[in-house]
Amino acid sequence: MQSTSHGRDTARVDNLKTLNMCDFCSREIETCGAKMIHAKELNSYQSNSMDPDSVVACDKYESPVEVLKRKFH
């Protein structure tokens, strides 16, 4: 099995799925004003990401579960 430059197995990295954090956030992407890190900005994802524009880190992510907890508790 081939290894990547980071010492991980190529097959293991190729099987990763990139999730866009914005799809799971309760904020509206057009108005949230968050500082986002896209998959293409991270070296380990550059060649393996199916969607290099997906957001993998954010400073204003708000879980819908947390919003519901505040609202109903």
Image: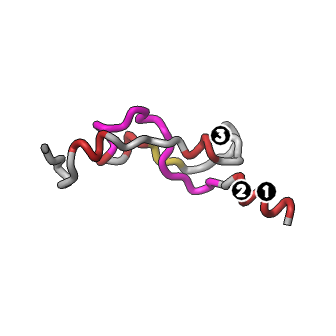
Q: Give coordinates of residue 9: x percent, y percent.
A: 20, 49
Residue that numbered label 1 is attached to: 68
Depicted 5 relative to depicted 47: above or below: below
72 relative position to 62: left or right:
right
Residue pictured at 76% horizontal, 57% vertical: 67
Please identify the quarter of the rendering in which residue 11 is found.
Answer: top left
User: Which image quadrant: the C terminus?
Assistant: bottom right
Other-residue count near label 2 (Cα within 10 Å), few / some / many at <14 / 14–19 / ≥20: few
Residue that numbered label 3 is attached to: 29
Q: Give coordinates of residue 31: x percent, y percent.
A: 70, 41
Q: Which residues are magenta?
A: 45-61
Which numbered circle lies on residue 65? 2
Q: Residue furthest right?
A: 72
Q: Amino acid at mark 3?
A: Ile
Depicted 70 relative to depicted 22: above or below: below
User: Does residue 63 show up magenta in the picture?
Assistant: no
Residue pictured at 33% horizontal, 43% vertical: 45
User: Does residue 56 show up magenta in the picture?
Assistant: yes
Which numbered circle lies on residue 48? none
Disc 3 on helix, strand or loop?
A: loop
Q: Are marks 2 and 1 in contact (CB under 8 Å)?
A: yes
Of the numbered discs 3 and 2, the one sitting upstream in the chain is 3
Please identify the quarter of the rendering in which residue 47 is found.
Answer: top left
42 relative position to 28: left or right:
left
Q: Residue furthest top?
A: 50
Q: Give coordinates of residue 44: x percent, y percent.
A: 30, 48
